[in-house]
Image (spheres, helix red, strand yellow):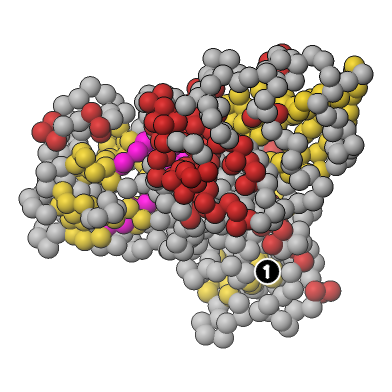
Amino acid sequence: MAKPIQSGNKTRFTDLYNEPVDHLLSPIKGYQDKPLVSLMEAIEPVSKVFNEIEDNVLVALHNCQSPADGLNQQESASIHLYTMEFDSGLSLYVVLNESLRAENRGDLKPWFSYLKLFLTALHKLPSQSRRVWRGVRDVDLSSKYKTGTKFAWWGVSSCTADMQLLESEKFLGKHGQRTLFSIECINGKSVSAHSYFKNTENEIILMPGSYFEVLGQLNPAPELHIIELKEITPPMTLVKPPFSKSDEQKPSMVVNEPNTLSQSTSIEMTPMQPVNIVTNQISARTSEMAQPPIPMVSFHQKTFGKNIQLDNNALRATRHTSYDDGITFTNRQIEMNEYIHIRIDSNESRILMGSLAIGFTQIDPNTIQIHELCKSAVPNICQKTGLSYVKRIFDKGAFYIFNGREHEISRTIDSRMPLWGIIDVYANVKSVVLTTPPKRILDARTFFIKYESQPHNLSIRYFTHLQPTNLQPIVFHDVHGPELELYCENKVVFRKNVRKLTRPYLFINFPIKPGDEFYIRILSIDFNYGTPGIIGFTNSKLSHILANFDKLPADDPMDLYNRREFWIINKDGFDERLSELDEYRFVYDQSGDIYMCRNNESILPTRTVAHIDP
């Protein structure tokens, strides 16, 4: 079982002496591909190392029956077990941290299932930027942590937000050699609500692989050494996030009729409130950077409509009879900004009125009996008290991503309560599958590492007749949409991690004349969107437009036509076959045509994208 911490014992807050800070170990990876399992199953591969650890698992599960922070019981219990001090033998955190610090990464493999569950739980907790404390007793570590040193702590770093806690004789005490670390963290995880010692320790966990810089040292008393650390971004990903690799998959077919969903249609829904960049000259298109992937959901295996059959993995839901009684739920709560990817797998052979409905509910499916479910999720989800937000796919006001196009379910979702996903397999839609998301693009930092921080200086791939010395760099103007960022002396534009843009306008700081041509390179794209991008032209004074930038249309760029200035907007300014590192040539000829050529292709080499009367 568990016991209070005894004086002089090594504890989670003082377990750092053996951290290998003099050299960087190889990254931790592989565990993220393990499936999520129960805590008892996760601990089984290492159970022989401990004395009757199963009893401690049962204690943890019992104490975590109503977990906070949106965690489920197994996730909360994995943290609870980590914080426990076992009555006999080594505690779990001692052996786990030894394995995390081992140079032989093979020593960590038996821990993969537990790490998957434990780190998934920690990733769900909000990150905190604050000052935290930990230390070690009976030793001076000043020479090991010299000012300016950068290093990683590979173990799970338990800290406290209460410095006075460490003055207790249970931890550092007030006498003898002591090294106290004052840490300015940026990714701290408060686990007090899930700890065995929830009322006393105010514990903040720093994730394995946290990276620091020593800012300085103090020696306020003869035997007290304080080392000040700052958490910083590591030179590489040291511990892979606890999420499996997603399949590379493009959105499928588009909608053919207003009340019919095509088979294999891709839908994305989220309880919300490429980098397409140009080098050398200019960019005219941006795409969204994606949210980091999170563990995939399945269908709830207890609560679903009486006409629904689930496959063995609970990833496919098929309505086998009638046209209704096809309500399904997700097996867990949906996180804010999490995306659920749904594929329409098959439709009814007969024509029925109605279509798929999707949305979210604050009603826990575990509290619903099948006989309480109504035949359709719209307008009422079930005979239970609670708020639900459900829309048919083609209802006005629904929010979801349908084959790359955005819609909205509701602007009034109360995110203070947990939300479960709802999919009503209704009428024309017969079968749906929960799928892995399409390929997401790189984050900004990784992207620039890929191109060695010089994406604007890549060599020309297709228009090889051009000489770089004959090209005049064209830059973007400093005034642009709030979700866009400029890099490389304003030669590269990057779209931030957002779903919807507010005035996504970007202007080149150079007027083009008949006879001019300019070139654009696309560096990265987001396959979640089916439209290639928009390009436009205006003869209005740029200074006037930029001075009144906040008055430009906030939603549809086509609304620019309603303004007094002269505009030409082309929603199909780029080719549907858009690929990374594509090069586009735009020529403004003397007749007033602006035509485009992609990658110097000889077949269909040009396409007129605009015409301006002389």
Q: Residue at x 20, y 25 (%)?
A: 384
Magenta region includes residue 343: yes
The magenta stretch spans residue 544: no
Viewer-closest of 379 and 67: 67
Q: Residue at 53%, 71% (x, y): give it.
A: 608
The part of the chain drawn in magenta is: 330-344
* Majority secondary structure in the magenta region: strand
Q: Is residue 530 left or right of residue 133?
A: left
For residue 472, side relative to residue 559 (left or right): right
| Whole-percent x, y for residue 123 in the image | 53, 38
463 horizontally vs 212: left or right: left
Residue occupying image coordinates x 25% and y 32%: 366
- Give the residue at x 76% y 51%: 24
Residue type at the position of mark 1: Tyr
**Residue reaching furthest to the bottom:** 602
Residue at image mark 1? 519
Q: Is residue 76 visible?
A: no
Helix, strand or loop under label 1:
strand
- In the rendered image, residue 409, in percent from the top left (x then y), is placed at 34, 38
Q: Is residue 107 above or below residue 466?
A: above
Placement of the C terminus among the 4 image quadrants: bottom right
x and y percent of residue 189 in the render? 59, 30
Q: Position of residue 65 (x, y in %)?
A: 36, 26
